[in-house]
Image: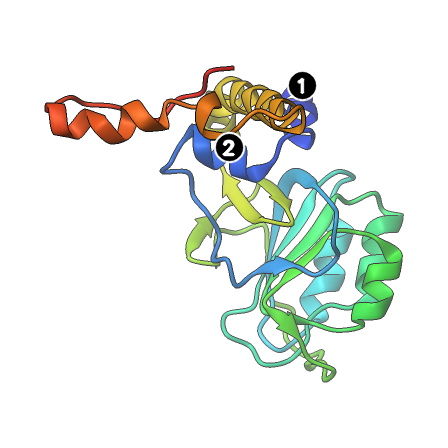
Amino acid sequence: MADLLGRLRDMQVSSLCDADKTFPVVDPAIRALVPDVRMVGPAVTVSCVDDHLPMFAALRAAAPGSVLVVAGSGGTRAVAGELFASEAKRRGLAGIVVDGLVRDLRGLRALGLPVFARGTCPASGSTRDPGTIDEPVSFGGIVVGPGDLVCGDDDGLLIAAPDRFAAVIDVAEGIEAAERALVSAMRNGHELHSLTTVDEHVAAPGRGEESALGFRV
């Protein structure tokens, strides 16, 4: 697992999606609020609906390197902010992702811990419902279980079982290597079209042939 996590930390989520077009993608409305970060870690799930009391239990239960996956279920109040993010960072967590709202955006950005959410709201919820932790939750259109891997960057979030990531990591690394070579070639003056099989790919259906777009690097 440690090797897989290390390889995923160097990986763009877009490359994983290119390696497997059916990979579970979280609703794109849940986006990175702290820019220029990458995050990967096992999920600690928590259900919070307009009540941030469950966050205390979730933080205490979360091991270093894990990601808090907070299911807000359509709530309209912030369930996390700078205080919870500060404690998460102190405990060595990899990040916090919220299917809902957060607050203290300036403080979150200064802190630098990866935080994903649907948006912000200055008003917080109540502190009466203890909620649930480490149970399957509905998050951004997919079901997330404790221990699923969460992988995110500025493009969005992927969440799936570790085996799903392990199955595509080799292909995704190959895609990234090819794209780096493409970018390098274009910086040296080469045209993108000449570095791909786009012309052959476009012409193939007219000849009744199957085709896939490929690289020449």
* Residue at numbered disc 2: 16
* Disc 2 to disc 1, C-alpha distance: 16 Å
Q: Residues within 10 Å of mark 2 (few under 14, many from 20)?
A: many
The circle drawn on residue 153 is none
Quadrant of residue 6 within the rendered picture: top right
Q: Position of residue 89 (x, y in %)?
A: 85, 50
Hey, which residue is sitting farthest front in the picture?
189
Q: Position of residue 182 (x, y in %)?
A: 57, 24
Quadrant in which the N terminus appears: top right
Residue plotted at (69% across, 82% down): 126
Is tag 2's residue or tag 1's residue first in the polypeptide sequence? 1
Q: Is residue 181 left or right of residue 141?
A: right
Q: Position of residue 174 (x, y in %)?
A: 53, 18
Q: Is residue 173 left or right of residue 104?
A: left
Q: Nearer the viewer, residue 29 or 139?
A: 29
The circle drawn on residue 3 is 1
Residue plotted at (70% across, 54% down): 96
Q: Nearer the viewer, residue 199 or 51?
A: 199
Quadrant of residue 78 within the rendered picture: bottom right
Residue type, numbered disc 2: Leu
Quadrant of residue 46 within the rendered picture: bottom right
Q: Secondary structure at mark 1?
A: helix
Residue type, numbered disc 1: Asp
* Rendered view: 10 above or below 52: above
Q: Position of residue 67 (x, y in %)?
A: 68, 46
* Rendered view: 94 above or below 101: above
* Rendered view: 53 above or below 20: below
Q: Residues within 10 Å of mark 1 (few under 14, many from 20)?
A: few
